[in-house]
Image: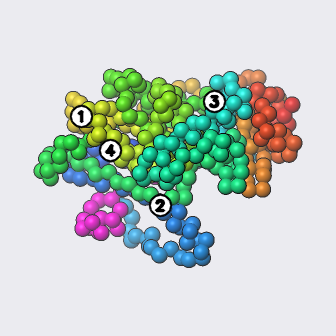
Amino acid sequence: GRMLGERLGSPRAKTMIGAVSGHIVQVLVDRACDEIARGERDVVALVGGESENSRRRLARRGLPLHWSEDAPGEPDARVGEIKWVRSPDEERAGLYTATAIFALGETALRRTRGETPAAHRDRIAALSEGMSRIAARHPRAWFQEPVPASRIREPAAGNRMVHYPYTKLMTSNIAVDQSAALLICSEETADRLGVPKAKRVYLRVATEMSHTLLLSERPGLDRHEGQALAARRMLEIADIGPEDLDHVDLYSCFPFAVQAGAAALGVGLDPLPSLTGGMTFFGGPFGNYVLHSKATLVEALRRDPGSLGAIGSVGGSFAHFAFGLYSTEPGDSVRPRVEDVSAALARLPRRGYVVGYEGEATIETYTVECDASGPRHAIFAGLTDAGERVWGRAADRDLLDALLADEEGAGRRARFSNCEVEVR
């Protein structure tokens, strides 16, 4: 931030850095609006970027980076933190990546919907194709051509299975060079600088949820009550229903994120709740994706004055959430209403879990982790007869091949012992 301030001719600008988390962009917008309303700032530039594509291209050619990433000193403030909190058995089962966690949520959602594995893969491939078509219409998307569902669904060269049921073309594409910025200021400053009324967009309501629950403690793995709380509260404060939203973009690192966000907000999947085409096809520059979705919403609202737009974002391992409601009309006040619903989630009941469980359980959800050489192991969440969650893994090749061939794994009985699973 300080390097950018110096290049822009503002060497004394205060700097703040947010954690690399999808929901942090909304949190930073909320903080900027609050500081401006209290008279502490006139203008705030919220800026983010990612150069992973160039970094990888240089590495493949054996060339060093030709830019400096070192800045003297520290930012004036830091906001948020990455919380990868796991139980011992979550760790032993192999829950190290966001891909694994979202894939478990995807299978849990499929089970709730009553779909067969094959039909489910058809559906999320079609969903992903729809996202690619939105991205193809976006002038700043990384992929400029739609991708057919058949190519997305089937593992192939360049599209291997990553975590069943997700192929590479269902996962966030971080190898991009993308950046975006928002300028936030007071109404008085906008008047003084002559910013046209037609270019002004207002944050009207925002909600945040940053209370961390272990994956094991969540009542269900097909949804997160913290996300639902944040979405409902945004609509309640604004006194609107989901049907009043004209433009919606929901965090889209994986198909599960889009589906869960839509369910929490109460919107459907037709049309898809995306303005960009999502983090596979538009591009997924880590937490900075949300800055791109907000910039795209600003453009949409300017084309459609008086309409309402909502941005939903996700942080961590589907753990933290934020929603923002925007319009070219400020509503009752230019100062937005911001509410943190973390305490409300903290008061809700949690599921019990057992570490080191020995005994029978019913498989709740599962995923198969694969690398370039094929399947490595399966991760299972199980529920004991008492309703407690347990974790385990299995590496039996016949079992892995069967699961990858769309054999049902959820709902089956299994023996859990020392975090190893034997499926009946």
Q: At label 3, which amino acid type do we have?
A: Leu
Secondary structure beneath label 3:
helix
**Which quadrant is home to the C terminus?**
top right
Give the amino acid at mark 2: Asp
Q: Is residue 259 above or below residue 85?
A: above
**Residue 147 seen by the camera:** yes
Mark 4, other Cα within 10 Å: few <14 / some 14–19 / many ≥20:
few
Mark with earlier residue (2, 4): 2
Residue 88 falls left or right of residue 376: left
Residue denoted by label 1: 329
SS state under label 1: loop
**What type is the residue that disc 1 sits on?**
Glu
* Distance between the alpha carbons at the discs numbered 2 and 4: 21 Å
Q: Quadrant of the N terminus?
A: bottom left
Residue 140 is situated, as x and y percent measured from the top left of the image, at: 42, 53
- Measure the alpha-carbon separation of dots 2 and 3: 33 Å
For the residues marked 2 and 1, what is the alpha-carbon distance in whole angstroms? 33 Å
Q: Earlier in the sequence, mark 2 or mark 1?
A: 2
What's drawn in magenta, residue-wise?
Answer: 1-25
Give the mark nearest the N terminus, 1 or 3.
Answer: 3
Q: Quadrant of residue 382?
A: top right
The residue singled out by tag 3 in the image is: 109
Q: Which residue is mark 4?
A: 299
Can residue 352 be seen here? The reply is no
